[in-house]
Amino acid sequence: MADREKRGEGPARLRAEASAGLSAARRKGARPDSLLRWTAPTLTVLFVLVAWQAACTFEVVPSFLLPSPLDVALTLVNDAPLLASHALVTLGEALAGLACGVAAGFLLAMAMDRFAVVDKALSPLVTISQTIPTVAIAPLLVLWLGYGMLPKVLLVALTTFFPITVSLASGFRSVDPDVIDLMRTMNASWWQMFRFAKLPAAADSFFAGLRISATYAVVGAVVAEWLGGFEGLGVYMTRVRKSYRYDQMFAVIFIISALSLLLMGAVRVLERACMPWKRVEKHEKPHSL
């Protein structure tokens, strides 16, 4: 009996040691990957800033055409209250338009999945809607709806609903047909199949589309503000452009990029909160040794 237990203990101990060694190897492999993920973009940005500052210092480009990074940084500090007030207006328009675009895209994708006639009728129109330039729609919306917040929100919604619709429709179709057949044999309704099979399967596609829409939201709001409005980063950029204050223009560009990155980061946080199993899969993925 004792010999049998020893023989059984040996393979179990070997498996435990092998598993521990593999986990340690994964941790060692993950550290360089994580370090490289943050170091590479940081060094790239620093290189661009140094090259930019050098070009301005040695007057490769006239200073009135290309302000230096230091001038832009000083503008950000000196005009911080004014820039912040305009940025809050643009961010509010972007968030409101993004929320409307997500809601419209979700309902449209759900209708296209539920009714084949709706899918065939609206798919070409959804595609055609993205061939119309945003700058061509914005003046019409301002003309019809005035200079308030409504045309900006509507333009952002029109800009952001397409990635949501396409990604969700694709995600709904990616469900395993065997799962649908199994639920039908259990007399599941369409809503039950949608809620418990199609909606979870489309979650990954939804967040991929939401990341794209988040980057479009701020740009769409700024474009709408260019063509009419009283406040916002687009209005502020138009004013400083007419006065040839390019340092302020670059400051606005920096803030627009920062707002877009902020929205993308918020989407990633929301994705991790709604899909915690993705983090588990990422940690369990074996690294090449």
Image (cartoon, grey):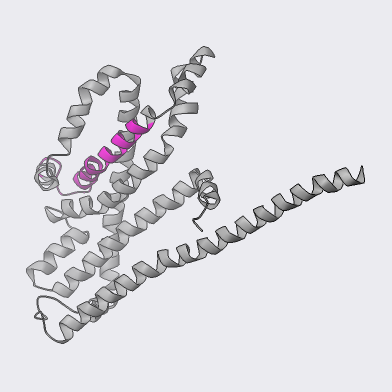
The answer to whether 38 appears left or right of 29 in the picture is left
| Residue positioned 51% across, 59% down in the render | 289
| Residue positioned 13% across, 42% down in the render | 141
Tell me, yes or no, whether the highlighted magenta stretch contains residue 159: yes
Q: Quadrant of the N terminus?
A: top right
Looking at the image, is 65 positioned above or below residue 191? below
The quadrant where residue 66 appears: bottom left
Name, please, the residue furthest toward the bottom: 58
Instruction: Residue 11: give x, y in percent of width and height.
Output: 75, 48
Tell me, yes or no, whether the highlighted magenta stretch contains residue 102: no
Instruction: Residue 189: give x, y in percent of width and height.
Output: 47, 16
Looking at the image, is 87 positioned above or below residue 143? below
Judge whether residue 98 can be spotted in this image.
Answer: yes
Instruction: Residue 158: give x, y in percent of width and height.
Output: 22, 40
The quadrant where residue 160 appears: top left
Q: In this orientation, which residue lies closer to the viewer: 133 or 27?
A: 27
Looking at the image, is 201 positioned above or below residue 160? above
**Which residues are drawn in magenta?**
143-171
